[in-house]
Image (cartoon, rainbow, N blue to C red):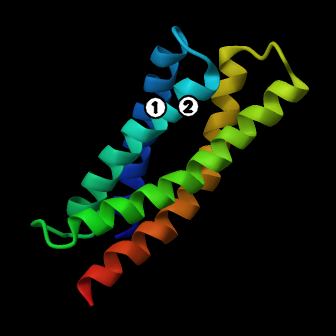
Amino acid sequence: MLFRFYLVGAASAVAYVLLFLVFRVVMSSQAANVLALLVSALANTAINRRFTFGIRGTDAIVRQYVQGLVVFALGLAVTSGSLVLLHRWVPDASRAVEVSVLVAANLVATVVRFVGLRRVFTEHRS
């Protein structure tokens, strides 16, 4: 299960960074972060639900997505907070520095996400 979670997480991380870079061209780093994280988190939840945790069908899907969004909010707090601190310390940070900080923040958020999603989907099985 953990290996599949890592595979999904790696793909989600790549998608998140690419989305962030695309959105960042036309909006602030915070707005780009929110949108990129939301899109990648929704896809991540759907893929983890099926591929990692083997859940099919629509039983409890609304509850699982709501709980997944709570987990998303925790990750958003970590990444948004890291951007606030970065821009406070380095007001003119380059895109490369922003992405580096966000990747590090997402590593922390991934641990939170795994623990949270594992609990969400394990409750479904019991």
Identify which amino acid the numbered label 2 is placed on. Asn
Vertical placement of residue 97 versus 1, above or below: above
Label 1: how many Cα within 10 Å (few below 14, some 14–19, many 20+): many
Q: Secondary structure at mark 2?
A: helix
Label 2: how many Cα within 10 Å (few below 14, some 14–19, many 20+): many
User: To which quarter of the image does residue 89 belong?
Assistant: top right
Identify the residue at image location x=67%, y=19%: 96
Identify the residue at image location x=30%, y=59%: 48
User: To which quarter of the image does residue 109 belong?
Assistant: bottom right
Dot 2 corresponds to which residue? 33
Q: Position of residue 64 (x, y in %)?
A: 31, 66
Vertical placement of residue 63 versus 16, above or below: below
Asked whether disc 1 touches disc 2, contact meaning CB atoms under 8 Å apart, the reply is: yes
Q: Residue furthest top?
A: 26
Identify the residue at image location x=40%, y=60%: 68
Horizontal side of residue 16 vs 27, given as left or right: left
Identify which amino acid the numbered label 1 is placed on. Ala
Identify the residue at image location x=30%, y=45%: 43
Q: Secondary structure at mark 1?
A: helix
Q: Position of residue 44 (x, y in %)?
A: 34, 49
Q: Residue furthest right?
A: 89
**Quick one: quadrant of the N terminus?**
bottom left
Vertical placement of residue 73 versus 39, above or below: below
Dot 1 corresponds to which residue? 36
